[in-house]
Image (cartoon, coloured by chain):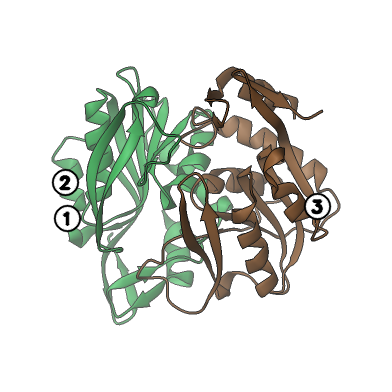
Chain colours: A green, B brown
């Protein structure tokens, strides 16, 4: 998606050719107009699939998922929680996730009330790197016997293994910007 | 806001006349169409104020803030973070917040890059009870010398002190549903 790539080139900050920081528009300050364009693009790429629910994980996925839901006819969004608040009782689907950015492991949780076998789910997240968060969401969708229509990612780091993890399960993956690497302070996009 | 009150009556679950659980549409599964109506309502209530940024706190505020931003001309949303990821460097505004629901204290943080004296901010959150989270966001906005246009809350528990905390600072408070209390498994709304 050209608009997104331009934005990454313009506002992305590269740290030590290792980290791409996009908190100017994607995960701290949020550009909702850009998110709407992304939602429109996923709607085009997942055309013909009867998606009736979006699943994401807190926190960075929530905004993108909600604005994307508007392009799929205001379908519900369910976000997996990392902590269990006191008010979250009842039965839960759970999956283990390891965050390389935060260097910690956690269990993500979705209430059994909000996912079931009638759901055809689009999984949305901001980044795909090793794929641990996405694998956790796929795991939860499988526990719920959902149909998984696909995975929509904003920025994929192609060199970290997440792509294979999704495709090997026969799931459609649509990343809006695919990074081959970071080199000399510049982003190298995949063709 | 009548539509919201109806939804709370229909889908809210009251636990021991103490906790109102709304994770069916507000903070686990998300109804983006309802959020859009809420955004429209805040736009009406804060009419004439030159709001150019929305501030909220992760996680439950993010979705509401983003869809509300669409009604204010797609202005940027900045959400305060509870944890500091490795990629969040630079200087931060910080404020201490105590969550009664999670029974823990934390520091919420916003990068100094995303708030400054030119900003006229609308603070958005899902709940107002004791007001600790909102007080933290007000504190951060004051550190940044922002103008605070007001505070928009989805559900206010009037009996827990947050209202006085906001109004005593001369800040406009617009809660879309105000609870007087929970009694015999029913929600008592303020007139």
Label 2 – label 3 distance at C-alpha: 49 Å
Q: What is the C-alpha distance between the residues marked 2 and 1? A: 7 Å
Label at residue B172:
3
Q: Nearer the viewer, residue A108 or B95?
A: B95
Q: Which residue is mark 2?
A: A165
Residue B17 rendering spot, x and y as whole percentages: 58, 26
Q: Circle 1 sits on which residue?
A: A161
Q: Residue furthest left?
A: A168
Identify which residue is drawn at 77% across, 48% down. B173
Q: Give above or below for A118 relative to B172.
A: above
Residue plotted at (16% across, 46% down): A165
Under circle 2, the secondary element is helix
Query: Seen in the image, is A94 located left or right of residue B126?
Result: left
Q: State if disc 3 and disc 1 touch (CB < 8 Å).
A: no
Q: Quadrant of the C terminus of chain A?
A: bottom left
**Label 1 element class:** loop
Please tell me whether mark 2 or mark 3 is closer to you in this view.
3
As drawn, is B59 to the left or to the right of B64? left
Chain containing the residue with disc 2: A
Q: Nearer the viewer, residue B47 or B104?
A: B104
- The answer to whether mark 2 and mark 1 are in CB contact below 8 A is yes
Q: Is residue A34 visible?
A: yes
Q: Are marks 2 and 1 on the same chain?
A: yes
Q: Is residue A172 visible?
A: no
Q: Residue at x 58, y 51 (%)?
A: A33
């Amino acid at each position: 998606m050209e608009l997104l790539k331009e934005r990454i080139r313009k506002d992305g900050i590269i740290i030590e050719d290792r980290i791409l920081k996009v908190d100017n528009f994607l995960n701290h300050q949020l550009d909702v107009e850009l998110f709407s364009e992304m939602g429109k693009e996923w709607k085009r790429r997942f055309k013909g699939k009867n998606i009736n629910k979006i699943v994401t994980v807190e926190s960075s996925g929530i905004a993108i998922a909600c604005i994307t839901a508007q392009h799929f006819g205001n379908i519900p969004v369910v976000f997996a929680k990392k902590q269990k608040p006191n008010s979250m009782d009842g039965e839960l689907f759970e999956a283990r996730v390891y965050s390389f950015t935060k260097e910690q492991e956690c269990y993500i949780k979705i209430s059994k009330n909000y996912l079931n076998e009638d759901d055809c789910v689009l999984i949305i997240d901001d980044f795909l790197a090793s794929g641990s968060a996405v694998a956790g969401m796929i795991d939860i969708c499988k526990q719920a016997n959902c149909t998984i229509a696909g995975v929509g990612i904003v920025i994929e780091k192609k060199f970290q293994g997440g792509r294979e993890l999704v495709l090997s399960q026969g799931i459609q993956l649509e990343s809006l910007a695919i990074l081959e690497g970071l080199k000399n302070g510049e982003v190298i996009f995949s063709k």
